[in-house]
Amino acid sequence: MAIVPSVSYGGSFDLNCWDFEVTPNPAFSGQAVTATTTCLCFNPETEPEILRSGTEIVITYNATAICGVPPPPFTLSFPLGSLPPGEYVVTHAPIWHELGPFETQQAPLSIVPYSVPIMNNWPSRLVSCLLFLAAFVHLTNRSSSFRASRSTGRGKAAPLS
């Protein structure tokens, strides 16, 4: 006789999964995101199907509960790819193909537009760099002329031979 998981509120079966999250979050548009969850007493049987409708993403697949002595917890990963900017809700909704849906998990996801950072106030930074370069050149030339004057007798011209 098989042991059937207890029915929880809403008529779905206990999933025994926790820590459902989407990383990175927030992510930049064009950046790949992945949903992960940790599970126990649970066996995925089919490849996940990832459906997106507007800002809702649903991950679903067939699974069965493992009854008796449970195996150690394991992590499931679902690559979601890159998404356009927006606020999303990601739902993990496996189905026990014999008895119906397991309980679902949800996680929010924010995708922000990618932008190239610009240098703030670049004209003043350019002027600062040019002034620093001019000071460096001036000090370098002054140091060279000081060394030349010391070798020739304190600024006097060297005798021609």
Image: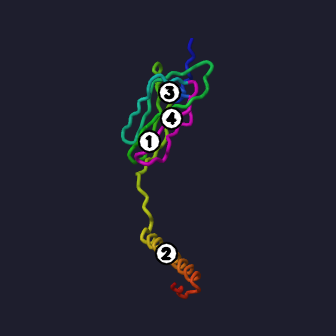
Please tell me which residue lies in front, 144 or 20. 144
- Three-letter amino acid code of the residue under disc 3: Phe
Residue at 50% of width from left, 73% of height from top?
A: 132
- Three-letter amino acid code of the residue under disc 4: Gln
Q: Which residue is mark 2?
A: 137
Image quarter of residue 90: top left
Q: Which residue is mark 4?
A: 105
> Label 2 near label 4: C-beta < 8 Å?
no
Residue at 51% of width from left, 85% of height from top?
A: 160
Q: From the top left corner, tell me how far across and down residue 129 is, in percent.
A: 47, 71
Residue 2 is labelled as none
Q: From the top left corner, tell me how far across and down residue 22 is, in percent.
A: 49, 40
Q: Earlier in the sequence, mark 4 or mark 1?
A: 1
Split into 4 quadrants, where in the image is the N terminus?
top right
Compared with 57, 26 (above or below) is below
- Three-letter amino acid code of the residue under disc 2: Val
Identify the element where label 1 is drawn: loop
